Structure formats: C-alpha cells, structure tokens
Amino acid sequence: MPDRFLVHVAVMAVVTYLIRAVPLVLCRGKLGSRWLRDFLFYVPYAVLGAMTFPAVFSATASPVSAICGVAVGILLASMEKGLLTVAIAACAAVFLAERVL
C-alpha cells in the first residue's frame, strides 16, 4: 500500500511540474498577441471565481443568508472597496442575516 501512495505522489509531482515548466520553455519572449495576454491575465480570476462562488451558498446555515452576503459583497466590490472591507462586510451581513432568521 505505501508503494502505491509514493507512485501517486510522484505522478502528481510530475504533472504539476510539467504544467508549470512547459509554458516557460515554449514562451521565452513577450507574448505578441494582445488578446492572448488579456485572456491569460483574467484566467486566475475566472478560476478562483468558479471555485469559490458555488461554495458560498453551501457555507451558511440558510441560502437566504448566503444571498445577503453575496449581495453585500457584490455591492461593495462594485463600489471598488478593498478586498478586506468586502470580505468583512459580507461576513457581517451573513452573521446578521442568520441572527434575524
């Protein structure tokens, strides 16, 4: 059993290394395509949003409190408030909504 574990860890290490090393080998200079640069700039934000957003609705006691937190977060983010301010205000909104419900 421990041998299979080490094989799995080795395969994951190789895959992770290849994902990071291949772009460095293939793209030595600056990317010429403005579209590709813009696309790659927004990929981390899109992935983070896709991973985080669904979990927001299952992390609270009720969907109503989750919707309140998301609404406050979106409102403050659209007003260009800082990340810490948005996070604290969204958590406070969820807390208050759960106390009221």
Image (cartoon, grey):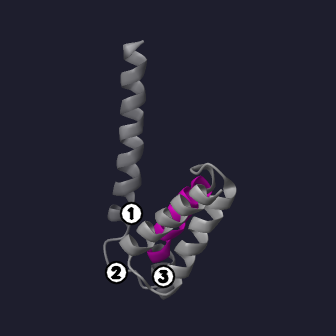
Which marked residue is nearer to the observer: mark 1 or mark 3?
3
Q: Is any part of residue 47 visible from this angle?
A: no
Which marked residue is nearer to the observer: mark 3 or mark 2?
3
The image position of residue 11, as x and y in percent, is: 41, 34
Look at the image and say whether residue 50 sits in the magenta stretch.
Answer: yes
Which residue is nearer to you in this view: 43 or 72?
72
Question: Majority secondary structure of the magenta segment?
Answer: helix
State which region is magenta. 41-56
The answer to which quarter of the image holds residue 28 is bottom left
The image position of residue 91, as x and y in percent, is: 48, 62
Residue located beneath label 3 in the image: 38
Q: Residues within 10 Å of mark 2 (few under 14, many from 20)?
A: few
| SS at mark 3 in the image | helix
Q: Residue at x 33, y 63 (%)?
A: 24
Q: Residues within 10 Å of mark 3 (few under 14, many from 20)?
A: few
In primary-sequence order, the first of circles 1 and 3 is 1
Q: Is residue 99 left or right of residue 11?
A: right
Q: Is residue 100 left or right of residue 78?
A: right
Residue located beneath label 1 in the image: 23
The image position of residue 80, as x and y in percent, is: 45, 86
The answer to which quarter of the image holds residue 101 is bottom right
Residue located beneath label 2 in the image: 30
